[in-house]
Structures are given as C-alpha cells and as structure tokens.
Image (cartoon, rainbow, N blue to C red):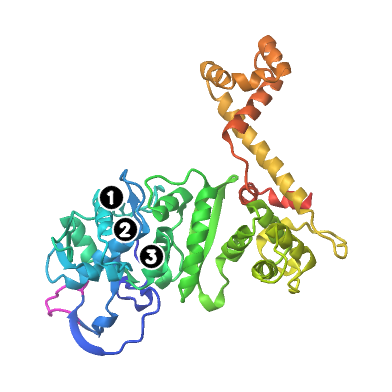
Amino acid sequence: MERPNNIAEADAPNLAAGTPAPRKRVRRVITKAPAAKVTPAGSVVVVQDAPSPVDSAELRKAVEAITVRNTSSSGEISLIQRKAYNAMLQIAQKNRTGDEITFEVPISELESLVGHTNSNNREYLKQMARQLMDIKVEFDFKGESAGRKSAWGIANMVAEVYISDDGQRIKWSFPPELAKRLLNPEVYNRIDMRMQNVFTSGSALTLYETVSRYYGFELRETFREHWTAWSVILSGAPKPHAQFRDFNKMLMRAMEQVNAHETRFSIELHLSKRGRKIDKLWFVLKDKEQSQLPLESQATMVSELVMKSLMTLGLTDNEITLLAMEHDEDYLLAQAEFTSKRISKSGMDPIAHPKGFFQSAVENNYADAPRRSLQKRESPAHKLLTAPTAKPRAKSKPDIKRTLDTMKEAWRAAKIKEIEEKFQAQDSAKQAKIIDDIKQDLSANTVIWDQYRKKGLSKLVLKTVYEIIMKKNVPEPSAEDLLQFALETGSLQTVAAA
C-alpha cells in the first residue's frame, strides 16, 4: 500500500476531490483522531471543522478500493456499478457508529448519490445489485512489476443486497473483513460525491479517483506500470485491451473528461518504450493555471465535436482526418455551420449533396472564416507530419495523401512481417493446415499454385500466402490507426521527411 511523502494523507485538505460548495454553517467539535493511539498521558484529540449535513456528501475512499482488478467472468465494472458502490460506501461511513456491516436506507437516498432519480423504475437497480454481487475483485492492484510492495486481497464487492416489498428501501452488507478496511480506512482519498455524476464513462471516473489522490503528493506523479495493468484498472474488465491503440482511444476520452471537469489540475500522460513497443505509462498532475491540456500533446488529430459535425454531413473518418491535417478546426466548424444553415434555409434550392457542398465551402471559404496557418500550431503530431524544408515555398501545401499512403505501406509491411514470424514459428503440420485453409484463395492464382505444387513453399509462394492471410484476417486501418502505428514505431519523422 503506497503512502504519501511527508504528509498525513488521510488528513490532508488538499486531497479533497473537486471544489466543494461554500459552507453555510460550520460548527466546532472535538473528535478523536482516527489514526491516533492512546498513550499513558491520555487520548490525543484534535479540533477540526465539522461540515453541516448539506456539505457532507464526501467519501473517504480507501486507496486499495480505487485501483482494483476485476477477476470475475461477469463482464466489466460499469460506470453505474462504480457510482453505486461509492454511494454505498459513503452512506455506510456516514451512518456507521460501531462495527456494523449491514446498512439500510431509502432507495431515494442511494439514487440521489448515484445520479438516477427515476423512482418508477427499480429494474435497473436490481440489475446493478445482481452485477455487484457477481463481481469479485483484487484490491489495491497496481500491476505485477517485480519488487512492488502492496497489500493484497480478493473479495466480492458486496455480500448481499435486498429491496423491501414496497420497493422504497434498500439494504446491503459488506464482507466482514472488507468492511474493516473500507469503512474506517487508514489511508484514503477524499472523493466529492458530486464529482462522480459529471463523468459519462467508468474509465473517466476511475482515472479521476486514481490521479486525484496524488494531488497532495510532493511529486504529483502516479505509480508507473505497464499499459496493460492500466487497461485493466481503468476499463474494469477482467482482461486488458488486445492492443495499445484500442486502450489509447479509451484513455484519451477519459483524460479529456477529467481535464474538462477537474478545476485544480490537469493531467499529462507519460510513456516509456521497450524497443519499439509502448511499455509503462504514468500521469503527472500540473496546476491548471500553469499547464496546457495534455490532449494537445497526443496524436489525436480530430476532436469529437469536429468528428460528429462532419460525419453528419456524410464525410468518412479518413476524409475528416485529411481535412483536419490541412485546416484549423475552427475553420472547419465554421464551414460546417454555414453548410447546415444553408441546408435548412427555406426559399432556396435544396442541396442534393451536403458532403460535396461542404467540401466546396472548405475550398472556397463560403463562411468567410479566418484561415489560420497550421504552421503556428505546436502539437507534436502536426510537427511530425509537416516536413521541414530549407526553402519553404509560398502557398505550398504538404502532400497529405502521399504521407498517409506512405504510412499505410509501412503499416502493411509491419503486419506482413508479423504474419511471417507467426507462420514460421509453427511446425510443418500446422503450416500445412494453414495452407489447406486458404487453398481456394491460393489456387485462384494459377502461377503461384503451380509453383507451390512443384516447389512447395518457395519465397514467392510464401509471400502470396502471407498476403492472403492478411487480407482475410486484418482489417484495413483508419487514418487514426496509421497515426498511432507511426507514433508507436517512430516512423512518423521518416515519413514526414520523405
């Protein structure tokens, strides 16, 4: 279990997540310090501010309950499940007076913390309870790195859940040992319960809970671990994403939400590589007023707003990416808005092809929007994709189509290489089985088929075999896939300079 540097994390005021509302009433009370021990001189007491009930929706979430690994086969830990579990913990902490592990409250109280107030429909609540009962997790999971010291435990998240006959009250209990750890934690992160309702994905809420803990640390840096461990933690799934690029898409969306709603700091993603592959990652917290959003340093070429606006007009993912590489996003949004207004304008000839009209608007600046040179944008993706020249020509444009084609060739060559390595690693029997599976495709090429029958797996035959396997099993990459591949392999600079 990690502990903060030179601070008492459990009492550090700057660990409170979010910015709490101004307090209306504050009364002074004397309480026993939870971590203090009785000495011969008597009990140690501290004086602290006690919030009024209206401000008391705060969860002291044990750090081991923040980073967990789902070991069940019931699917992912969803957003609604994580929010409901937080609500159960908060209610239990607020009402616990002794060693209780069972708690009962009006359903409306739980729903208000979860952010769901549809009192006419309890089915979602029953389904959530069933799922929570089925989920078993490893607590305080931070990967499998050698030398990492951390407490460990595995348990069901809740022991039992009941809803009253009239459907107005809910009762639940925690496993006894788990209740000791989670309801009176020694080391915890303060979670403002209002914050969990601003996130729209479980990965965003989990990322927020994880990184906000480190705001009170001197280094303001999270633990470092392989990206697959972070994939399990943030997704709530039993297994990590198969490829980094798939995990990265989820991570970018989660980071965008955290940086949009957290007022104290923004988070920056840091990566390390082992050879050409992404290895470990971690996050660094920066004061909001002193840093830029970390998404500006990522290879996300198109914002969600631009993507949605342009897809509505009929553009494809690749077409949007190409446009975003040549034009500022504000410029594209201005042309999209102009096109939408023109389509809906009455008294004028209807536009038969919105996509073509928009492309013409971009080319001719129908919206009369300011054209901003992309040379002034400082994102690394743009720097890498814009080839430096000793003598830039006036009004010259980078050959974006050629750049993407070159990246696609490099991607294709890498995939063929992977297929070759896997094929050669098989024994002769398995190779024969693979050839038999693609026999129909291979025999369609009479020249290659004749050579295979006469000479077996020659170089030319093997090349065709690899291409057939790739065509049947590997989908065509999107522009975003190509950019991610280029960043992971370090080939973007070579492509841009070509």
The amino acid beneath tag 3 is Glu
Residue where numbered disc 2 is placed:
81
**Lateral position of residue 250 relative to residue 91, left or right:** right
Can residue 187 be seen in this snapshot? no
Which stretch appears magenta? 34-45
Q: Are marks 2 and 1 in contact (CB under 8 Å)?
A: yes
Specify whether residue 38 is painted magenta: yes
Looking at this view, name the residue that lies furthest to the front: 347
| Res. 52 mark | none
Can residue 303 be seen in this snapshot? yes
The answer for how far apart the CA atoms under marks 3 and 1 are is 20 Å
The amino acid beneath tag 2 is Gln
Dividing the picture into quadrants, the one containing residue 332 is bottom right
For the residue carrying disc 1, how many other residues have a C-alpha within 10 Å: few (<14), some (14-19), or many (20+)?
many
Query: Looking at the picture, how far across and down is residue 75, in whole percent?
Result: 35, 47
- From the viewer's perspective, is the residue at label 3 or at label 1 nearer? 1
Query: Looking at the picture, how far across and down is residue 485, in whole percent?
Result: 62, 47
- If you read the primary sequence from the N terminus, does the residue marked by circle 3 or circle 1 appear first? 1
**Lateral position of residue 249 relative to residue 83, left or right:** right
**Residue at horizontal 19%, vertical 60%?**
179
Dividing the picture into quadrants, the one containing residue 108 is bottom left
**Residue at horizontal 66%, vertical 55%?**
315
**Lateral position of residue 145 relative to residue 493, left or right:** left
The answer for how far apart the CA atoms under marks 2 and 1 are is 10 Å
Query: Looking at the picture, how far across and down is residue 297, in whole percent?
Result: 61, 63
Residue where numbered disc 3 is placed:
209
- From the viewer's perspective, is the residue at label 3 or at label 2 nearer? 2
| Res. 135 mark | 1
Instruction: Give SS at disc 3.
Output: helix
